[in-house]
Image (cartoon, rainbow, N blue to C red):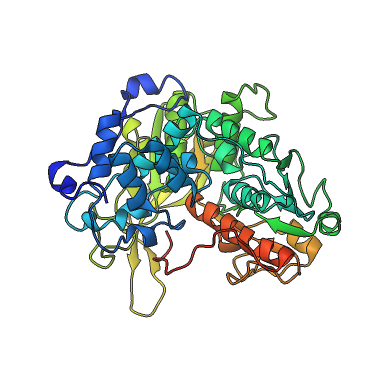
């Protein structure tokens, strides 16, 4: 695959970025793509490695060496067909996926891995530019109806696959626009919302019906949906946010990260009126949580014109390289520095927030932290120990809680009598993705817990196969098989 000696001749090259001072002026995507010849050279680096471990690293099982080879040979349309055969939305994953496939790349054992994610992005962008991404409505309809709940990547993938099987699919989205966290969670500078809109247009042309402002369990009765449709697929995500049960958590200025990011996405889309505006302009901002959501808060705060931006992570600072106990091809927990981090932030690790401090009007003015260390003992859960004498008070006008999610909301589960596990995920077996209620299926974060966009798409595709089998007795939809590496 690729050029036999390509990995010896070409070094890895990635997209460039616009200068920080330029990109902080707006919310547009700021990557600078490689030339077509540059992308071909990156495709040429894909080795004839014999066993492509990238397949196992990718939750979708993308045929990575195959599309790399086509890119190297300049056969972009064939590359696009191969890519879309396993991934409904490569324009999302090509921008937002942390690329576990690259960590599993054989070349990555002793060299920089193939730049798979960027190649993927260039393939799909070329496909849209050339007009190759068009609607493919099913030639025949089965007469079966399916309700998909949730318009994020899992729900969109399930809807498209089931529509391709010929079923009449209606997708219910509680927000005013479809996209889930892609639209109201991921900042526009990472994913321009036109990228979502152009794909939704294709899905509508294929025959999928979208109903927005339809909050199942609230203004849409879940039991009624079960009666009206032959199958229901729950793809609502893990949306219950983790809080901080410490003194002062109720103060004005202690804000959930997703409230901050969602409002800003709406602001960028043109909405100007909010019940309570959340902005970082001129404020000392502390982002609590070191993951992708925390990074998004940092980039957004800097674009607001924050006075200062600080980031806390309770875990130890990861190593710069791959840890010894996470060898190739496993996903390594190493230090990752995003483009938002490079725009301006001071990062602190092994630090725990103890208390939020407020003024006489109930507004946040500071917080208290302590340094911590983690105690590891064989066979036991890690223990967190506070270090005496390390308490510190910080000025803070806006604290953004980017602490992840604890599971899915219970409303639909309670209405339909669905079983949930101890993490408040809805129980559904990976053998058929069906819940304890016949005809009700679950996919994505709602089933497996908070995870990646690429896992959500994979889950939606897998669930669709089992829904189709349930409705028709068998299915011609693709089903991924094989052994996956431990999930990210």
Residue 8 position, x and y percent, is 13, 47
Q: Quadrant of the C terminus?
A: bottom left
- Say left or right for 320 vs 390: left
Residue 230's place in the image compared with 128, above or below, is below
> Residue 466 versus residue 364: which sits nearer the camera?
466
Residue 209 position, x and y percent, is 74, 41
Residue 352 position, x and y percent, is 42, 53
Query: Which residue appears at 44% of the width and 41% of the height?
Result: 80
Query: Which residue appears at 84% of the width and 52% of the height?
Result: 221
Extreme residue toward the front, this view: 139
> Residue 185 versus residue 328: which sits nearer the camera?
328
Residue 91 position, x and y percent, is 47, 39
Extreme residue toward the left, this view: 8
Query: Which residue appears at 39% of the width and 70% of the height?
Result: 382
User: Residue 443 lies in what quarter of the image?
Assistant: bottom right
User: Residue 421 lies in what quarter of the image?
Assistant: bottom right
Tag count in the figure?
0
> Residue 337 versus residue 392: which sits nearer the camera?
337
Residue 26 showing in the rendered view: yes
> Residue 16 versus residue 344: which sits nearer the camera?
16
User: Residue 384 lies in what quarter of the image?
Assistant: bottom left
Extreme residue toward the bottom, this view: 379
Residue 350 showing in the rendered view: no
């Amino acid at each position: 695959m690729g050029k036999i000696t390509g990995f010896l001749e070409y070094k890895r090259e990635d997209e460039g970025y616009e200068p920080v001072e330029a990109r902080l002026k707006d919310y547009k995507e700021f990557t600078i793509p490689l030339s077509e010849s540059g992308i071909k050279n990156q495709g040429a680096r894909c080795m004839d490695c014999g066993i492509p471990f990238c397949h196992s690293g990718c939750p979708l099982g993308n045929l990575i060496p195959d599309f790399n080879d086509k890119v190297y040979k300049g056969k972009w349309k064939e590359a696009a067909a191969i890519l879309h055969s396993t991934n409904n939305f490569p324009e999302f994953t090509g921008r937002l996926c942390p690329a576990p496939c690259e960590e599993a790349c054989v070349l990555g054992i002793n060299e920089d891995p193939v730049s798979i994610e960027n190649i993927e992005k260039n393939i799909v962008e070329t496909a849209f530019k050339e007009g190759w991404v068009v609607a493919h409505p099913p030639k025949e309809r089965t007469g079966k109806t399916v309700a998909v709940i949730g318009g994020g990547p899992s729900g969109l993938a399930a809807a498209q696959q089931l529509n391709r099987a010929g079923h009449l699919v209606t997708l219910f989205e509680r927000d005013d626009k479809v996209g889930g966290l892609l639209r109201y969670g991921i900042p526009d500078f990472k994913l321009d919302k036109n990228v979502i809109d152009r794909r939704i247009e294709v899905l509508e042309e294929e025959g999928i019906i979208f109903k927005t402002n339809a909050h199942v369990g609230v203004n849409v009765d879940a039991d009624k949906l079960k009666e009206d449709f032959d199958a229901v697929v729950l793809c609502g995500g893990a949306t219950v946010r983790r809080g901080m049960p410490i003194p002062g958590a109720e103060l004005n200025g202690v804000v959930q990260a997703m409230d901050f990011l969602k409002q800003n996405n709406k602001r960028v889309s043109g909405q100007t009126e909010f019940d309570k505006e959340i902005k970082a302009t001129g404020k000392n901002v502390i982002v609590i949580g070191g993951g992708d959501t925390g990074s998004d808060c940092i980039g957004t705060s800097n674009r607001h014109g924050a006075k200062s931006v600080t980031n806390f992570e309770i875990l130890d600072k990861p190593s710069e390289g791959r840890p010894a106990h996470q060898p190739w091809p496993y996903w390594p927990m190493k230090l990752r520095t995003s483009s938002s981090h490079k725009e301006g932030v001071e990062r602190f690790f092994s630090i725990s927030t103890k208390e939020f401090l407020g003024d006489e009007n109930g507004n946040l003015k500071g917080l208290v932290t302590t340094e911590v260390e983690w105690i590891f003992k064989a066979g036991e859960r890690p223990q967190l120990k506070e270090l005496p004498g390390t308490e510190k008070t910080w000025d803070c006008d806006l604290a953004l809680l980017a602490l992840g999610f604890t599971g899915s909301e219970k409303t639909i589960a309670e209405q339909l009598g669905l079983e949930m596990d101890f993490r408040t995920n809805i129980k559904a077996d990976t053998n058929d993705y069906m819940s304890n209620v016949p005809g009700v299926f679950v996919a994505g974060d709602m089933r497996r817990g908070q995870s990646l966009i690429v896992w959500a798409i994979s889950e939606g595709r897998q669930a669709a196969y089992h829904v189709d089998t349930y409705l028709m007795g068998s299915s011609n939809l693709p089903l991924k098989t094989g052994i996956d590496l431990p999930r990210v």
